[in-house]
Amino acid sequence: MILLQHININGSEQLHGKELALFEPTGDHVNLKADEDSILLVMAGEPINEPIADHGSFVMNTHEEINKAINDFNGGRF
């Protein structure tokens, strides 16, 4: 995620402030170049290959789990 300014990715794609880049799980590196002072957040991890359901700040695997989490949160059980 580019927070401020802009970044060149792999020599071709450019991202500007408050943009997000997602990469396919292939290859073993990414080239990043900032043309000026920038703030960049880089996150990496292994794909979990599971379904994703979200609602607001809640992220689970199913909508049923989302509903339970919201009920638990509203009931003070979080």
Image: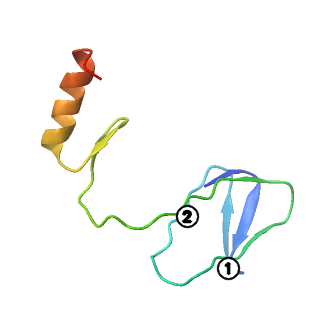
Mark number displayed over residue 21: 2
- Residue 54 x/y as whole percent: 29, 44
Q: Label 2 vs label 1: CA separation?
A: 12 Å
Asked if residue 78 lies left or right of residue 47, the reply is: left
How many numbered discs sit on the rendered protein? 2
Residue type for callout 2: Ala
> What secondary structure is marked by label 1?
loop
Q: Residue at x 53, y 63 (%)?
A: 44
Q: Is residue 73 depicted above or below 30 in this figure?
A: above
Q: Residue at x 50, y 72 (%)?
A: 23
State which quadrant residue 34 falls in. bottom right
Q: Quadrant of the C terminus?
A: top left
- Residue closer to the observer: 23 or 5: 23
> What secondary structure is marked by label 2?
loop
Asked if residue 11 lies left or right of residue 42, the reply is: right
- Residue 53 x/y as whole percent: 25, 49
Q: Is residue 59 depicted above or below 48 in this figure?
A: above
Q: Is residue 13 depicted above or below 71 in this figure?
A: below
Q: Quadrant of the N terminus?
A: bottom right
Chain-order first, disc 2 or disc 1 = 1
Asked if residue 62 lies left or right of residue 9, the reply is: left
Q: Residue at x 23, y 27 (%)?
A: 70
- Residue 59 x/y as whole percent: 31, 43
* Pointer 1 residue: 10
- Residue 46 x/y as whole percent: 43, 67
Residue type for callout 1: Asn
Q: Residues within 10 Å of mark 2 (few under 14, many from 20)?
A: few
- Residue closer to the observer: 22 or 13: 22
Q: Is residue 71 depicted above or below 51 in this figure?
A: above
